[in-house]
Image: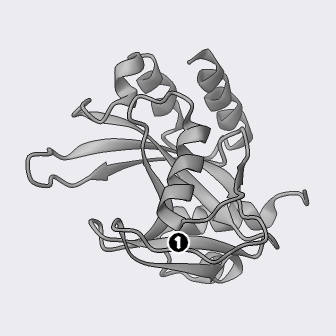
Amino acid sequence: MSALLAQFQHYRQQWPDERDTTHFEAFLEEGPRVFLREALEGHFTGSAWLVSADGERVLLTHHRKLQRWLQLGGHADGDMELSRVALREAEEESGLTGLSVDAEPFDLDRHRIPARGHEPEHWHYDVRYVVRAGSNEAFEINEESLALAWRSIREIADDPGSDASLRRMAVKWLRRSPR
């Protein structure tokens, strides 16, 4: 967990204007239980900013439960290596193979998840990583998605109607130094 804490501290230094980043550090101090969805007040999740091989597009899911276009991702389920969670979720939700994940968080987003069934309203401490597609971009839709689509990162950044966190990630991606 100390490696993740160091990553959060480094992220805060890189993005000092982003609010809520210190919440991630404080939440991590609560111990391993916050990596389990049974932590009803909130838990860590890992998400993928899954970019095409050319770096121009991102794969989004029309999330079945939330009814919104979002990045791929999901619950840590006890796995404290959130980059591995992001990669696993990207593979499971897209059917793509040959993906690679960056080691450092690309974005942090704390958001409320509405109550549903027996699950109370709670926080998701979503740690997002860049996941890169290989040459095969032919995805397969699974039961968690209503649809999947490759979307232009520039269009997301330029669209004021885009989800705020998707737009933030698109702007970050476009401002990054070439890799």
Position of 152 relative to 142 (above/below):
below
The residue that appears at 46% across and 67% down in the rendered structure is 70
Q: Position of residue 101 (x, y in %)?
A: 70, 48
The kind of residue tagged 1 is: Leu
The residue that appears at 61% across and 31% down in the rendered structure is 8
Where residue 175 sits, quadrant-wise, is bottom right
Position of 60 relative to 22 (above/below):
below
Q: Position of residue 145 (x, y in %)?
A: 38, 71
Q: Is residue 88 left or right of residue 131?
A: left
Q: Position of residue 148 (x, y in %)?
A: 49, 77
Q: Secondary structure at mark 1?
A: strand
As drawn, the residue found furthest toward the left would be 118
Q: Looking at the figure, which quarter contains the C terminus?
A: bottom right
Query: Label 1: which residue?
Result: 60
Position of 73 relative to 33 (above/below):
below
Work out whether residue 73 or residue 95 is closer to the camera in this orientation and state it. 95
Q: Is residue 56 left or right of residue 169?
A: right
Q: Looking at the figure, which quarter contains the N terminus?
A: top right
Q: Position of residue 45 (x, y in %)?
A: 44, 42
Work out whether residue 93 or residue 32 is closer to the camera in this orientation and state it. 93
The residue that appears at 68% across and 75% down in the rendered structure is 137
Q: Residues within 10 Å of mark 1 (few under 14, many from 20)?
A: many
